[in-house]
Amino acid sequence: MENTTHKKAFVYRLYPTRAQEEALVRILDLTRELYNAALQERRDAWRKAGKSVTVYEQMRLLGEVKAVRPEYQGVYAQVLQETLKRLDLGLTHFVATSEGEIVEAPRHFQKAEEKLAKAQRELSRKKKGSNRRKKARLKVAKLHRKIANQRKDFHHKVARKLVNRYGTIVHEDLNALGLARTRLSKGVLDAGWAQFIAILSAKAASAGRRVVAVKPHYTSQICPECGSVRRKELSERVHACECGCVLDRDVAAAKVILALGLDGALGDGQRVAAPA
């Protein structure tokens, strides 16, 4: 008999007092500051020394952070640890080419999240059926529309750049819907890959370019130089192989994807599988 585990979740609406709401906002401000500082530390370590800083190394420094910044002592340790773990789940690169060019994920939703949450809180406080509630609802809708327009404009610009530059474009055949149901969900939805691929394919078709989709299995685990396979954790952002190949993880995967696409594609839009 198949052994299946089911998880049940309960969602409760909170009605915090003003003091409680202010305390929650302070915690959000502190965790946002910690996230940005930890992200900058990782970027600096890689840029200056080619070194990857892991989430566990940063967690060990939380005690020092609390000693220097007493305000962090009022935040549960688990909350701070989960803030650092988010770095490992973030989608930092929107596009990485085999030539080493990287387009960072703009994170339109994440940047507007605080403003959107405030607008939604204001909406929930308005009396149902009132003109003020109607205006608040329109404000929320306007913010969502702005985020969607920013994302679409970004997709068009990146797609145009790729189509103008390359005759054949190979990409991972990602299951965006499936990824949206994982721990990466918010980043996946913010990136809007399904929309981007649709825009890219349309522009490529009108320009006479070829687009090839490669199945993503093992593409981030294969060395583009020697072909050896080594499992990497999501937190490992640098590909370092025993053969001496050292590359950004996504750039290394892009080289593998390109090779698979060019070697195995039999025609436009052909899906190619990575070796098992």
Image (spheres, grey):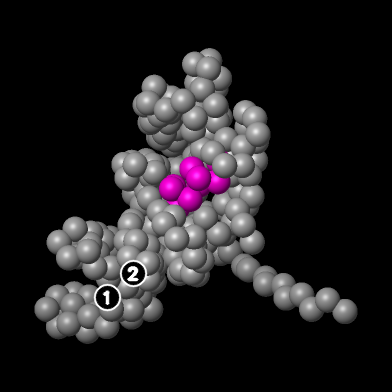
Residue at left offset 17%, top offset 82%:
64
**Amino acid found under the numbered disc labelled 1:** Gln
Residue at left offset 64%, top offset 30%:
267
Q: Where is residue 133 in the image (x, y as percent from the top left)?
A: 47, 36
How would you rate the neighbour count of disc 2 (Cα within 10 Å): few for under 14, some for 14-19, many for 20 or more? many
Residue for badge 1: 58
Q: Quadrant of the N terminus?
A: bottom right
Give the camera-side residue of 95 and 125.
95
- Which of disc 1 and disc 2 is earlier in sequence? 1
Q: Position of residue 275 (x, y in %)?
A: 62, 57
Magenta part, dominant SS: helix
**Image vertical order of residue 272 relative to residue 204, above or below:** below
Write down the quadrant of residue 86 in the picture. Answer: bottom left
**Mark 2 and mark 1: Cα distance apart in space:** 8 Å
Residue at left offset 43%, top offset 48%:
255
Residue 255 lies within the magenta run? yes
Write down the quadrant of residue 47 in the picture. Answer: bottom left
Residue at left offset 40%, top offset 54%:
252
**Image vertical order of residue 201 relative to residue 4, above or below:** above
Q: Do the residues labelled 2 and 1 touch (CB within 8 Å)?
A: yes
**Image vertical order of residue 198 relative to residue 91, above or below:** above
Q: Quadrant of the C terminus?
A: bottom right
Left or right: 17, with 45 as reference point: right
Q: Position of residue 151 (x, y in %)?
A: 41, 33
**Image vertical order of residue 215 relative to residue 220, above or below:** above
Please state the extent of the stretch shown in magenta in the rendering: 253-261
The tag on residue 84 is 2
**Amino acid found under the numbered disc labelled 2:** Leu
Q: Where is residue 149 in the image (x, y as percent from the top left)?
A: 42, 28
The tag on residue 162 is none
How would you rate the neighbour count of disc 1 (Cα within 10 Å): few for under 14, some for 14-19, many for 20 or more? some
